[in-house]
Amino acid sequence: MTTYKNIKGIEIKYLSADPPAPNAGQVWYNSTTKVVKGAINGVGAWASGNNLNGTNNQKRAGAGIQSSAIVMGGVGTGDDSNVDTELYNGTAWTEVNSLNDGRGLAAGAGTVNTAALLTAGRTASQARYDSTEIWDGSCWTEVNNLNTARYYAAGDGTSTAAILAGGNAAPAVTDETEIWDGTCWSEVNNLNSAREQTDALMGTTAAAIIATGQLGGLGALTANSEKWDGTCWTEVANVNTARILVAGAGISTSAIIFAGGPGGAELAITESWNGTSWTEVADLAVGRKNTTGSGTATLGLAAGGGTNPTAVATEEWTLTAFTTKTFDTD
């Protein structure tokens, strides 16, 4: 144990060079530069990406990562039946083959833009969908239906192993959860709180977290979060700002949620989840709701959304893993 001024009781490693990927809180003495350094949590920020091509860019479903994303369906002025699909390669959006069934307010799953799933949603006549489609990188194929038709549900996972929870199902908001195994949907244990109007479900069929939304019955906005362990849902720490029409990216232990709003408001607020608690971080450049989220907690993507259904703006989230700080030891 070595003690420096203002750094007492901390183990300091003696290294000839800075470590390439230190953990937050790690402190070391660089014997080459003869200074004491430490790693602190990284800083995240949003930056502009290239615009979407389509015009019905509210309530589109999304999946993938920042460098390989997909958005599908969506809502335009008086139209809930958008069939458009677009792919993002980290630089630009490209329009590709359309859905078989146009829909908005749907849920998506997938880790890359060559393999994705779309399910639930609402038709042009505002009927609830139970149908599911699979994207193979070239076209969409209809597969087995959900057990419960719904819209405004939240989903994540992959095209062969997806999870769907909540949503607006006749006659009311539902707490039902379903799991996709690549062939069919199976009902599993319900959420503790029925909710709709959130797309902030992040994770897999084995481990996921869902946050915010509008509760069933009372219609109140919620800050509630629940964590899925592959068997059941458990309530965990609340987000800082209750909201609806929010998007998210990440996994059950490391995620971000962003955008949304109560009523007519369009929030730019972003919150980060570390597996235990939520922390407010850097805002979006443009406040919006009904945006599409995808990616990870370190490399996220927000596409479309806003009051204007023709909104095309894309923003990219980047979180540095750590920041190196030099300590004064005089």
Image (cartoon, helix red, strand yellow):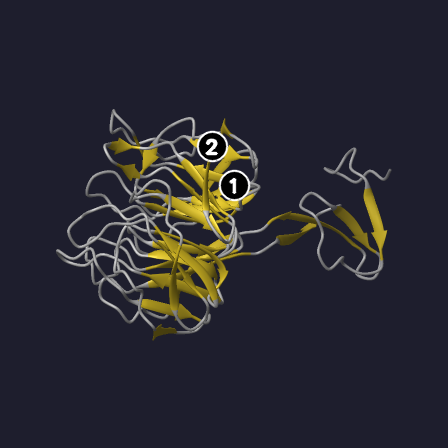
Q: Residue at x 87, y 37 (%)?
A: 1
Give, as a three-letter code, the residue at label 1: Ala
User: In terms of depth relative to the viewer, which is nearer, 159 or 70?
Assistant: 159
Q: Kindly identify which residue carries mark 2.
A: 226
Q: Count the labels in the image.
A: 2
**Residue occupying the point 31% across, 65% down:** 99
User: Is residue 281 visible in the rendered structure shown here?
Assistant: no
Which mark sits nearer the N-terminus, 2 or 1?
1
Most foreground residue, 88 or 258: 88
Disc 1 residue crowd, few under 14, some 14–19, many 20+, Cα 10 Å: many
Q: What residue do we see at 84% from left, 60% from top?
A: 16
- In this view, the residue in front, 140 or 257, is 140
- Residue 324, image quadrant: bottom right
- Is disc 2 surrounded by few (<14), some (14 to 19) or many (20+) residues within 10 Å? many
Helix, strand or loop for disc 2:
strand
Circle on res. 115: none
In the image: residue 311, left or right of residue 321? left
Q: Let me know if residue 143 appears in the view.
A: yes
Residue assigned mark 1: 208
